Amino acid sequence: MLVGLGQRFWALPLGFAIAATVLALGLTAMDESLDTPLRAPFLFAGGPEGARALLAAIITSMISFTGLVFSITIVVLQLTSSQFSPRVLRSFLEDRFNQVALGVFVATFVYALVVLRGVRGTSQADPFVPHIAVTVAFVLVLTSVLVFLAYIHHIAQSIRASTIIASIADDARALLDRRFPLDSPRLAELPVPSGPGRTVLADGPGVVQWVDDRALGHAAQTQGVCVELLRAVGEFVPTGGPLAVVHGDGTLEDAAVLSAVHMGRERSMQEDLGFGQRQLVDIAERALSPGINDPTTAVQAIDQLHDLLRRLATRPLPPRQVTSEAGHLVVSVPEPSFADHLALAFDEISHWGREDPRIVQRLLVALRDLESAARPEHRPAVQAALARLEGTPAASLTPASPPAVDGLSPSDIGLR
């Protein structure tokens, strides 16, 4: 639940607004509890009319400020979607600095509004001015100005091609390190029980975002069954589509499988390494399109893909399986092989960049480096890709079809 809220653009600004409301009420109550108003050089010293005028000016300016920031954000999102890829919008919406900036502006507006309601009377009749609260409102305005200047700089930097590409690659590298650590053992893939099983159907449409292996493994072990997922992370499943097969005589409820397979409207970077590669490939393809014609950006995307593939090529990619305490297979999740990742990263780019010598040469350099660095089990896939590039005229390069994984084509496992 908390992870889901963290991905909502409105969650953090709403938290700031609530905190500002509590702060305003608390400082106003503290001012009212004092027998004599505090007198200090830095505190607001005006009467009720002056306090109302100041707070009204803050409220008016901050709502305009917030509208301006929101407009800038929308323009940036539109520019990013059209020039790079619609799939990179998530990174802007989840950007913590953008959320904090909007939160500061909203908090200042809400704070001044709540404090204004606490100002009572006039200079001649029963006056009450929360001097501390009004002073804090002025401090928040100064803070908002500084945050606005930092926000402009941050937005200008965040729409640079190199920044977007590096941000996506950093997320993909972090996921790669979690999923395939350097010290992970090379495990043999256990065979899934043969024979018919009970098929679990999806209860709604969506993309498989992540799978709770531990919970599913515990439920399967308790019931003495083996759960074979048919759809990998990153793949779309329609309503009523086959999602998993339960092998064995145990009675594992469909709800236990469905609750362990988390689905959403779009792919995410929680467990889907292919989604990070897909975003980089989309940026490269958009850069190579005749309308943009920016091969330099495509080369930057290829460089990051090269780094990701090199990290993959030097690590074992163990099968995603869960075994019981007795060593029996209880959960099996289809995973793309290194050949699938390699095909996703380079095949489409080589197709659309076949007429650009820089693109072809950069792909050759990356593949030759991968060939020298890859583990023995990954090297044949690199050599096959390298042979296609070196042995085929650049004008006739076409994407190759990588081998199927667990009986599923690359389009089935969400790599395309």
Image: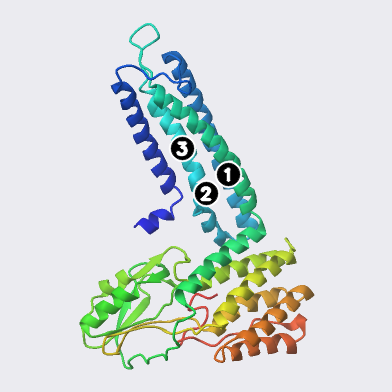
- Quick one: label 2 or label 3, which is nearer the N terminus? 2
Q: Position of residue 271 (x, y in %)?
A: 45, 71
Helix, strand or loop at disc 2?
A: helix
Q: What amino acid is labelled 1 in the image? A: Tyr
Name the side, left or right, on which 9 lies relative to 1.
Answer: right
- Examine the rendered structure and indicate whether residue 72 appears above or below residue 410: above
Q: What amino acid is labelled 3 in the image? A: Val
Q: Quadrant of the C terminus?
A: bottom right
User: In this figure, which residue is indicated by the disc labeled 2?
Assistant: 97
| Residue 356 visible (yes or no) | no
- Examine the rendered structure and indicate whether residue 154 appears above or below residue 161: above
Name the side, left or right, on which 361 lies relative to 119.
Answer: right
Question: In the image, which disc is placed on residue 106?
Answer: 3
Please report the residue visible at 23 percent of the width from the left and 85 percent of the height from the top.
224
Residues packed near mark 3 inside 10 Å, few (<14), some (14 to 19) or many (20 plus): many
Q: Quadrant of the N terminus?
A: bottom left
Q: Position of residue 131 (x, y in %)?
A: 40, 21
Q: Position of residue 252 (x, y in %)?
A: 23, 79
Q: Is disc 1 in contact with disc 2, using a CB cutoff of under 8 Å?
A: yes
Q: What amino acid is labelled 2 in the image? A: Phe
